[in-house]
Image (cartoon, rainbow, N blue to C red):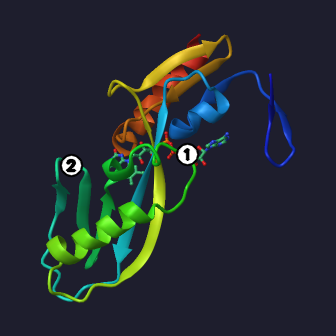
Amino acid sequence: MELETETGWTLRVPRVLVAVNGFAKSLLPDVDVTPARNQVLITHPIPDLPVEGCFHYDRGYYYFRNVEGRVLLGGGRHLDNSIEQTSEFGANELIRSALVQLLKTVICPGRPVEIDAWWTGILGLGPVKKPIVERYSDNVVVAVRLNGMGVAIGTLIGQEGAEMLLNG
Ligand SMILES: Cc1cc2nc3c(=O)[nH]c(=O)nc-3n(C[C@H](O)[C@H](O)[C@H](O)COP(=O)(O)OP(=O)(O)OC[C@H]3O[C@@H](n4cnc5c(N)ncnc54)[C@H](O)[C@@H]3O)c2cc1C
């Protein structure tokens, strides 16, 4: 089998494990994974920040925590769900302004807060909260659709995919 890279290299490989999660459709369009972009911010340090621990707000659509005296805040995808079903990184101003509003009025009311950085991340979601670990063809296995749990279960799913590939 031959793999072509974006930089023009061609690699000859006997087997392939596809483990690109939310980006899977760009390689295998029929795999049932929907990309979901998330907007995230971190503030500059806030003196005497009262927030301690991890929090979920509004049915879990928003999440925030204290990271070394700063607020890490993300979520709000439900405000513009169809636009955020993308594997392209990039800002969504509607969601970003909702996150700023939440930061200033609920998380840190009455305190001066400054945002240090914004970024986006891509989840791989599906109709059921179950990862896909399956043989795609004789020499290709997919291990994707981590459903927002990949930090917790990603290494296990990768291992299961690799074992399926090697033992098949
Ligand atoms: C904001 C946010 C918060 C999250 N919070 C949590 C949490 O609290 N707990 C938790 O368990 N999980 C959480 N997750 C989910 C977790 O980050 C993902 O499930 C996990 O990163 C998936 O790991 P992965 O290695 O399968 O995919 P990714 O980390 O997405 O890595 C896929 C890689 O494949 C690369 N790639 C894409 N296309 C190609 C291609 N054609 N060829 C080669 N490489 C390619 C990409 O560049 C990327 O580096 C969160 C995700 C986000 C975005």
The amino acid on which the numbered mark 2 sits, given as a three-letter code, is Gly
Of the two numbered discs 2 and 1 on the same chain, state the one appearing first in sequence. 2
102 vs 147, left or right, is left
Number of residues whose C-alpha sits closer than 10 Å to that of mark 1, classed few (under 14), some (14–19) or many (20 or more): some
Check mark 1 vs ligand 1: CB closer than 8 Å? yes or no.
yes
The amino acid on which the numbered mark 1 sits, given as a three-letter code, is Ser
Query: For residue 51, which numbered disc appears in the image?
Result: none
Name the residue that disc number 1 marks. 87
Q: Position of residue 7 (x, y in %)?
A: 83, 49
Above or below residue 138? Residue 70 is: below
Number of residues whose C-alpha sits closer than 10 Å to that of mark 2, classed few (under 14), some (14–19) or many (20 or more): few
What is the quadrant of residue 1 in the picture? top right
Above or below residue 89? Residue 141 is: above
Q: Nearer the viewer, residue 82 or 108?
A: 82
Query: For residue 60, which numbered disc appears in the image?
Result: 2
Which residue is rendered at x = 39% and y = 62% of the image? 94
Label pair 2/1, CB-CB below 8 angstroms? no
